[in-house]
Image (cartoon, rainbow, N blue to C red):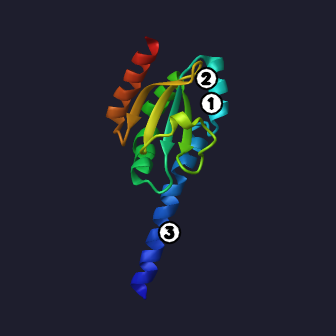
Amino acid sequence: MKITKYLLLLAMFFSFNLYGASERLEQKMNYEISYQKALEKAQKLNKPIMMVVGQEGCPYCNKFESKTLTRKSIHAEVEKSFIPLTILKFKDEGSYPEKFRPNGVPTVLFIEPKEQKVFYKSFGYKSKREYKKELENALEVYSK
């Protein structure tokens, strides 16, 4: 009986932690949650969209958000150069163009706002150092 209670408590804690990942990006990091709003901002400010696609219950998505995207140096670069958008793969389907639906998560799509085309893609968990390089690569491709 005790072991069942501990397992239930552990499962509840784990699921709450995973569920809060995208909310963390929205509330604390000021990521957009609407593709349309992000697109309007991107077109107005002439910045590409950085669309982070995760999934509820995905441990790699949660790790990527908590260990990489919420770091000050990463967040500063994202705010300066991109319009960040967070999407949950199954929950938010239909609220963004089908052509941006990734096969796996976490996936980050860098989208040119005028023609709405993906110009750079990053897949899977990336450390802070690895993702900083991804941001540099995306900006380099965008500037060409």
Kind of element beneath mark 3? helix
Residue 38, numbered label: 1
How crowded pointer 2 is (Cα within 10 Å; few <14, some 14-19, many 20+) is rated as many
Q: Is residue 122 above or below residue 92?
A: above
Q: Is residue 58 above or below residue 124?
A: below
Give the image location of residue 48, x and y in percent: 53, 22
Read off the residue under disc 2.
42
Q: Are marks 1 and 2 in contact (CB under 8 Å)?
A: yes
Alpha carbon distance from label 1 to label 2: 6 Å
In the rendered image of this protein, does residue 58 appear above or below residue 6? above
Q: Which quadrant holds the C terminus?
A: top left
Q: Secondary structure at mark 1?
A: helix
Q: Secondary structure at mark 2?
A: helix
Picture disc at residue 12: 3
Which residue is at a point 52% across and 47% down the rendered structure image? Answer: 89
Marks 3 and 2 sit apart, C-alpha to C-alpha, by 38 Å
Residue for point 46% across, 17% down: 142
